[in-house]
């Protein structure tokens, strides 16, 4: 019996680990050339992967685009949330169409976001780059705050008012 439980537990852990690895949330690297920005993006990607619906709503509202477009980038184009966020934010800062930035990302993914941002006119240390870092930090904090509020709501549902209390 104990062997079966341990085997089942091990299988479950393996499945969850594989799911995270496939989603890219644990291994995500924006490759911007800036360690602090890469860390913010990794954290944003993790939060967004854990709460995809909120990420889709948030991106749609922030960048005036349809939820179906954001969902399609995740589901059909297999883009990570961090890459989607960067596409739209770099688009905003560089005044380029988001579809153009996404195409450039797909064509130059191996070179990383640092290269793509520079191609869009966003140079390291420039005011636009500093704004990109600041906005990413804010977006990450907003995603984390929503996630925490969501877990607080789940705790409230078990408020001790069950029939055995």
Image (tube, rainbow, N blue to C red):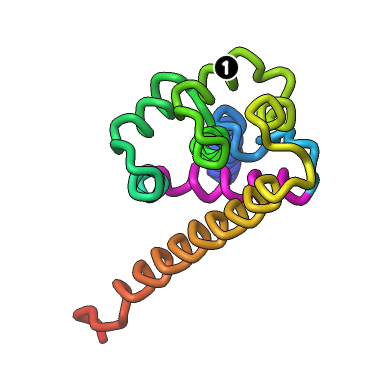
What residue lies at 57% left-to-right and 17% top-to-bottom? 106
Q: Is residue 164 left or right of residue 11?
A: left
What residue lies at 70% left-to-right and 50% top-to-bottom? 127
Please give the residue where the numbered disc 1 appears in the rendered image. Answer: 106
Which is nearer the eye, 15 or 87? 87
Which is nearer the eye, 25 or 37? 37
Give residue 16's quadrant in the image. top right
Which is nearer the eye, 75 or 132? 132
- Regarding residue 130, the answer to whether it shows in the image is yes
Residue 143 locus on image (x, y percent): 49, 57
Residue 114 locus on image (x, y percent): 73, 32
Give residue 60's quadrant in the image. top left
First to last magenta residue range: 36-52
Q: Is residue 138 above or below residue 103?
A: below
Residue 86 locus on image (x, y percent): 57, 38
What residue lies at 56% left-to-right and 62% top-to-bottom? 141
Q: Is residue 51 left or right of residue 11?
A: left
Residue 121: in magenta span: no
**Which type of secondary structure does the marked residue at label 1 adopt?**
helix
- Regarding residue 4, the answer to whether it shows in the image is no
């Amino acid at each position: 019996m104990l062997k079966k439980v341990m085997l089942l537990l091990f299988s479950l852990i393996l499945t969850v680990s594989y799911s995270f690895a496939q989603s890219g949330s644990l291994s995500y690297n924006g490759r911007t050339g800036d360690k602090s920005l890469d860390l913010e993006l990794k954290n944003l990607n993790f939060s967004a992967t854990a709460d995809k619906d909120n990420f889709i709503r948030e991106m749609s509202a922030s960048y005036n685009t349809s939820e179906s477009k954001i969902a399609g980038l995740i589901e059909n184009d297999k883009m990570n949330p961090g890459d989607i966020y960067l596409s739209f934010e770099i688009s905003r800062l560089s005044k380029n169409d988001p579809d153009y930035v996404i195409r450039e990302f797909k064509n130059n993914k191996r070179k990383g976001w640092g290269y793509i941002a520079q191609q869009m006119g966003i140079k390291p240390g420039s005011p636009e780059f500093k704004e990109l870092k600041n906005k990413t930090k804010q977006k990450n904090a907003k995603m984390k705050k929503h996630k925490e509020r969501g877990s607080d709501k789940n705790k409230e549902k078990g408020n001790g008012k069950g029939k055995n209390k």
